[in-house]
Amino acid sequence: MQKKLWTSALALLLVGGTVTAAMAEPFSSTPATAQVLVQEASRSQPPLDTRVVSLHLLELAELADFSDWRGAELSWVRTLHRPTGERAAVLWEVRQEGQVVGSLVSSTDGTHVYEFTRRPAPVLPPELRARAHPDGHIYSGPMMHLVYLQGAEGLELYNLLTGEFLPSGELRSALPDSVPASDATYATKPSGNAAVERRVADGSGTLDGGALLAAGHSGQPDNKQNVQPLHAFLTELADVDASWRIPSYVTYDAIPDKLFVTCQLAAVADTGRHLFAALRDPFAPVAPLVYIDSRLGVSAVRVSSPSAQ
């Protein structure tokens, strides 16, 4: 059974924890949001050409842990939307010789990868599938694969990764407002070096306290040395060897004052062109890591720990 961590004073939810039915509330979606979602679904378009997204598999396969993705095939799973209803991303499964070896989330035009992992594409439990809106899937950031379900009092948002219903409130998106026109100007590692992945200290024995501290920053940079935008932090890690010994977390406020997504920074993957953060759910340490593009609007928080000495 997964561990449970709930701080009522902050209304804090850590990804990987569980919330009892009494704590969870229906998501209060606005009529405008639902209307946009239905309008988008009504003019669905065929998924983009998989050959565009497949080019990213060659880059990701340069990482040692994903070398078997070279020559893999992509299978379209679903289109994902922003909290406001507009199309945001596309979810794909990665298959090698017919076997699922992972999944990834791309931008709607296929030119950027927001997230990739060894995990299969998340799905609803069978008992909830009849309640799902067929085009009601939301992607608002790392660890937030959501779907609208029809509840007794209206629409509710359910997290496919954690099996939780979200509390009511304004759901924010960690996705960039627009896709950059050029890789050379946004979230790109200009060195062109060979792909490499470096592990970060894990702060063993202090995960609960570290995650609480990180989430307490509400996912917002505060001009202090220990809280930075993710891309700036990863760039610094690549240049300062000592920083690799400092346990760190990635966090953002998915629903202000109610839902803070917090994950341990396990590694940094540099493909030679892009930097990705490998995230671990601190309460599900054996689950496959989730790698996110440093362009996402999340913060990195350094956490003091004896293991960082």
Image: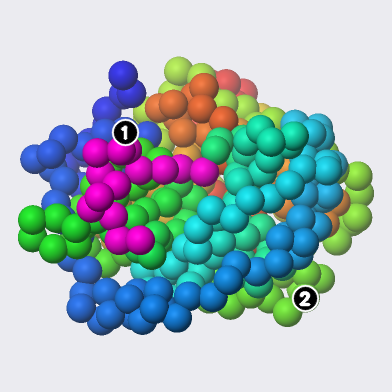
User: Is 168 situated above or below 31?
Assistant: above
Q: Position of residue 179 (x, y in %)?
A: 63, 74
Question: The disc labelled 1 sits on which kind of residue?
Answer: Gly
Residue ID for mark 1 = 17
Magenta span includes 126? yes
Residue 133 makes an appearance in the image: yes
Residue 37 placement, left or right of 263? left
Residue at left 22%, top 69%? 29
Question: The disc labelled 2 sits on which kind of residue?
Answer: Ser
Quadrant for residue 283, please give it.
top left
Residue at left 59%, top 55%? 76
Q: Distance between the residues labelled 2 and 1?
A: 38 Å
Q: Position of residue 200 (x, y in %)?
A: 65, 32
Q: Which region is colored magenta? A: 121-134
Tell me the number on the disc at residue 238. Answer: none
Q: Is mark 1 on a helix, strand or loop?
A: loop
